[in-house]
Image (cartoon, helix red, strand yellow):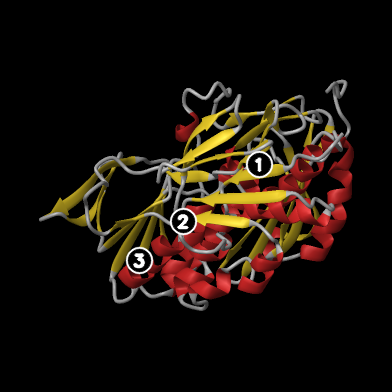
Amino acid sequence: MNPPGHILVAGASAAGLGTAEALRRKGYEGRLTLVGEEPEPPYDRPPLSKQVLSGAWEPDRARLRTAEALDALDATFLLGDPAVALDVAARGVRTASGRTVTADAVVVATGAAPRRLPGQDGLRGVHVVRTVGDAMALRAALTGARRAVVIGDGVLGAETAATARLMGPDVVLAGPQPAPMTAQLGPLAAGRLAALHTRHGVRLRTGVLLDALLSRDGEVTGVRLSDGEEHPADVVVAAVGCAPGTAWLAGSGLTLDDGVVCDAYCRAAEGIWAVGDVARWHHLGLGRTLRLENRTNAGEQALAVAGNILGDERPYLPVPYFWTDQYDVKIQVYGLPSADARAEAVEGDPAEGRFVVRYDGARGPVGVLGWGMPRQTRLHRASLVDHYTRPLEPTAT
């Protein structure tokens, strides 16, 4: 198979840049073009809700590569000019400026966009955390603020609440789960996380949704929750999940269903691949489609997509992994702990604040969680490999 003469990557964040870098590492010498929505050079998103938000890092420190490294990639970067349409047959991408770029292969890497709260648009004092600009605006708002409310109790909401609390304001963290991150951690570890936030002074409001944003003269003044409680706030953070960046693909002919639907090789159509937060691919080890929103997947999937573009034809079979840092605790999760999995502490002791939990399903171990024990957690990952990397079905191309 001859490599494509020109590869176009729509999206210039971690997944898009990672794909371009992997292509070069694998020996690709053809033309590379990256089209990006944001004008800034590619940067990392995990630090935005932690180091950048707190002020421990200035934004430049979150950049993924130096200017010299980007130059060495020998790629054309069209930044600040997002993709707005895709012609699948011609493998052409039209950008917001009206430019059309055609290529022999196209990689969709347009990430995800934060969902917004009802009544948020046009209301000052309500923030999201997705871009460097978002993090800097929230940092400025939290500096000197007395009260903050975070709506959403997943990873981003919990991280933002922890960082905000360390910056000084009183913080309320509200969401529908029985404890923060229950869906990602399971009840045992989520309960420990709830206790951690409470010890640091965060007020948890669990099992609730937002009923309304309260405001005066175009400025947010607080929230009313679905149980009727009202909480005054100088700052409100919306952390209610993200929607995959597929709006620009409407009418393209690609299958869109909570992401760009791909086969086991992350291929959405002939000559079209998808990678990162926007990609929903068929995970042969699980026998179903999967979309992951985390930094690790962006890098691992980029490597797989680059190889498949160049002819590897290998299904993408990762063991999912994410981590979160909150206060002085690092939590790592391998696999996909399910709500019905049996959780057992296999190292350490949850009561002492250092432990590893294994989650067992019908086919054996499905997840491993480590709380302050990174080395031991990595060792227990080995128990998951067969579950995720052994295909349940033939790998037909």
Q: Which residue is mark 1?
A: 275
Q: Which of label 3 and label 2 is nearer to you?
A: 2
- Do residues under tags 3 and 2 come within 8 Å of each other at their CB atoms? no
Residue at 63% across, 41% down: 292
- Tell me which numbered mark, 1 or 2, is placed earlier along the sequence: 2
| Residue located at (42% from left, 41% from top) | 207
**Element carrying mark 3:** helix
What type is the residue that disc 2 sits on? Glu
The quarter of the displayed image where residue 339 is located: top right
Q: Mark 3 sits on what residue?
A: 137
- Pinpoint residue 182: horizontal percent, then vertical percent: 57, 45
Horizontal relation, residue 358 to residue 108: left or right: right
At x 75%, y 60%, the residue is: 355
The mark closer to the camera, 3 or 1, is 1
Neighbor class of circle 1 (other Cα within 10 Å; few <14, some 14-19, many 20+) is many
* Three-letter amino acid code of the residue under disc 3: Ala
Q: Position of residue 104 (x, y in %)?
A: 69, 36
Front residue (pair 45, 237): 45
Circle nearer the N terminus (3, 1): 3
Front-lying residue, 4 or 292? 4
- Left or right: residue 132 compared with residue 41: left
What number of labels is visible?
A: 3
Please give left or right for residue 307 compared with residue 158 in the image: right
* Residue 329 in view in this figure: yes
Q: Secondary structure at mark 1?
A: loop
Earlier along the polypeptide chain: callout 3 or callout 2? Answer: 2
